């Protein structure tokens, strides 16, 4: 194990042990009479659920790395213990499980006092747990919780030797729109190995938003694996400082769609046509379809960086038309709002022209937890001037 890698891994383990020692001190008086190892683990998971999960994630990540090393180099490197086994190495755990401590605990145990202390700790921990839950849910609400079929291509584009720092920024922006272990693992890898500061920091903050508690790496500890002097100079002196800020405009996205690989490979199972006033119901619908493995296009999730109401223009229509072309079918969320939406009429008319499959689902069905979609055969939306109508509507919004 290289010195830098060993230092980082050992630091991770020390931090975990230190965290658990503090937590064990807070729960030792709450343990039941005649407690066992299982009681300690259960109590840690109850009062410190996110902290325990963070250790499980680290175990999963290092185990994946070891499997890769075993396959390609014939030996493992980290051999991290499972959380339940790692807990046994904590100094505070050993004290709690000693015969003398258990005997003293049982002789002094009072159920009423234990319950009161448990309630006090829970009242202290509950707001913190709920705050983290809210943070994670907010982060997930900005993503689709599935793995799109083209994700391997995106990651492959990123890892190519000739992919520029600028293009990598665009690729990461696309990967951030989906949430799955495969994508999270990729961001962990970037947080560990990416030489460019802006990209590595972006990966770090993305992991933080889901409370994965990554460790930020200093630039001086980043390793360059090349013997080519010219390339080594570039990777150590130039590439780490390269920076690109993506223009968040419809025109920029239109250009990327026509010219960039990360946009050309996209495909969607459904284009959701809806009124923004029904966004809560649309969120539930997307969640259901994601659980079925369906990739959904929804403008305020997939292209929220570029498609803003104050930036409406012809490029906005070009982007939406391209997304409809990339979608296998349209799914119209039927409500009073959507039936009176100029934008929904525009989308439905465009799909009709494309000759693609059209489906409908009512807002009431979504509200009642029913997600059975049906063919959309009605034609009340037909309008030969639908593009002109939506442009006029855009002018009103901007005026």
Image (spheres, rainbow, N blue to C red):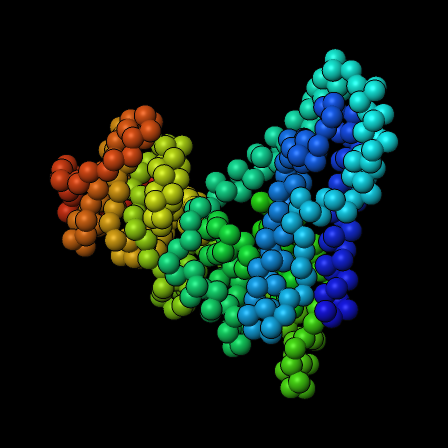
Along the line of sight, the residue nearer the viewer: 358 or 319: 358
Rendered image quadrant of residue 250: bottom left
Q: Residue at x 78, y 39 (%)?
A: 93
The x and y percentages for residue 341 are 28, 36
**Image quadrant where one finds the C terminus:** top left
Rendered image quadrant of residue 133: top right
Q: Residue at x 63, y 58 (%)?
A: 62
Q: Where 307 sits versus 112, above or below?
A: below
Q: Where 221 sits versus 141, above or below?
A: below
Give the farthest residue toward the top.
Answer: 112
The x and y percentages for residue 257 are 37, 62
Q: Could you tell whether 250 is left or right of 138 in the image?
A: left
**Image quadrant where one finds the N terminus:** bottom right
Q: Where 254 sits versus 331, above or below?
A: below
The x and y percentages for residue 273 are 29, 42
Along the line of sight, the residue nearer the viewer: 314 or 197: 197
Q: Residue at x 48, y 65 (%)?
A: 155
Q: Could you tell whether 127 is left or right of 381 in the image?
A: right
């Amino acid at each position: 194990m290289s010195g830098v890698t060993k230092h980082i891994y050992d630091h991770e383990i020390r931090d975990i042990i230190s965290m658990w020692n503090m937590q064990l001190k807070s729960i030792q008086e709450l343990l039941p009479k005649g407690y066992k190892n299982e009681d300690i683990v259960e109590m840690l998971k109850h009062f410190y659920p996110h902290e325990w999960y963070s250790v499980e994630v680290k175990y999963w990540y290092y185990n994946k790395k070891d499997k890769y090393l075993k396959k390609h180099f014939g030996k493992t490197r980290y051999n991290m213990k499972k959380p339940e086994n790692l807990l046994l190495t904590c100094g505070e755990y050993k004290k709690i499980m000693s015969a003398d401590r258990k005997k003293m605990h049982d002789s002094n145990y009072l159920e009423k006092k234990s319950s009161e202390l448990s309630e006090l700790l829970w009242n202290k921990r509950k707001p913190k747990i709920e705050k983290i839950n809210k943070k994670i849910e907010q982060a997930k609400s900005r993503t689709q919780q599935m793995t799109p079929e083209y994700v391997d291509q995106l990651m492959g584009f990123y890892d190519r030797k000739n992919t520029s720092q600028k293009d990598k920024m665009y690729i990461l922006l696309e990967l951030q729109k989906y949430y799955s272990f495969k994508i999270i693992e990729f961001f962990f890898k970037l947080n560990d190995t990416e030489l460019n500061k802006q990209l590595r920091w972006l990966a770090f903050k993305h992991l933080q938003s889901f409370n994965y508690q990554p460790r930020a790496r200093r630039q001086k500890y980043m390793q360059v694996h090349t013997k080519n002097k010219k390339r080594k100079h570039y990777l150590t002196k130039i590439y780490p400082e390269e920076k690109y800020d993506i223009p968040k405009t419809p025109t920029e996205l239109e250009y990327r769609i026509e010219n960039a690989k990360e946009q050309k490979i996209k495909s969607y199972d459904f284009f959701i046509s809806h009124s923004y006033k029904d966004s809560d119901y649309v969120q539930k619908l997307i969640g259901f379809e994601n659980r079925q493995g369906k990739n959904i296009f929804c403008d305020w999730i997939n292209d929220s960086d570029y498609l803003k109401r104050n930036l409406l223009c012809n490029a906005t229509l070009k982007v939406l038309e391209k997304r409809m072309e990339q979608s296998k079918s349209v799914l119209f969320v039927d409500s009073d709002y959507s039936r009176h939406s100029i934008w929904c009429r525009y989308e439905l008319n465009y799909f009709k022209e494309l000759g693609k499959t059209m489906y409908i689902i009512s807002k009431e069905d979504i509200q009642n937890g029913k997600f059975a979609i049906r063919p959309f055969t009605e034609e009340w939306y037909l309008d030969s001037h639908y593009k002109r109508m939506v442009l006029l509507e855009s002018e009103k919004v901007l005026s």
